[in-house]
Image (cartoon, helix red, strand yellow):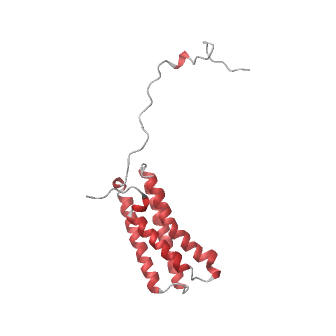
Amino acid sequence: MKERIRYHWEVEVYKLGFDAAMRIFELTKAFPGEEKYSLTDQMRRASRSVCANIAEAWRKRRYQAAFVSKLSDSEAEAAETQVWLAFGVKCGYLSREIGSELHKAYDDIIGKLVNMIRHPEDWHIPPLISLSPPPPLSRSPSEGVRGRGGGKCKMQK
């Protein structure tokens, strides 16, 4: 029997994304200082955003469209991370082997996200609020609202 997942950090794709983002963080510490506000920052931001969007999706799973939208954002950030990894390899900051290994990790992450997007019903929980109409009023609207004095409420001047 499958164990119930209660938190976003228990979802396998989140764990994979978090591990990959931490690996990128460690590797980018060795990037040259002139890349601090460009490649280093972009790579770290995109890789972390994968996890942040999964967390947001997890909390929006009551609403299928919102859930899928945040997972789609996470997928896009994973693909963006792959682009920054390619730049890291091309600029000589990452070895081809490490770049390839991380690129494959993000391929796996994207595959899992796509599977969740294709099957959101597996993750859906019912809304907290009732979508049924409110109960009818006990009196008709033409009766008005009674104030303290027993008469109809009037605007005070």
Q: Is residue 35 left or right of residue 105?
A: right
Q: Residue lying farthest top?
A: 150
Residue visible at 44% across and 60% down in the picture: 71
Q: Is residue 145 above or below residue 53?
A: above
Residue visible at 45% across and 72% down in the picture: 19
| Camera-nearest residue between 111 and 130 | 130
Residue visible at 44% across and 52% down in the picture: 65
Residue 123 sits in quarter? bottom left
| Camera-nearest residue between 77 and 13 | 13
Q: Is residue 117 above or below residue 87?
A: above
Indicate the position of residue 67 as horizontal and vertical percent values. Answer: 44, 54
Tell me the quarter of the image containing the C terminus.
top right
Residue 1 sits in quarter? bottom left
Q: Is residue 53 left or right of residue 42?
A: left
Residue 112 sits in quarter? bottom left
Indicate the position of residue 120 as horizontal and vertical percent values. Answer: 37, 55
Indicate the position of residue 23 as horizontal and vertical percent values. Answer: 48, 76
Q: Residue lying farthest right?
A: 157
Q: Is residue 150 left or right of residue 136?
A: right
> How many discs mark residues in the rendered view?
0
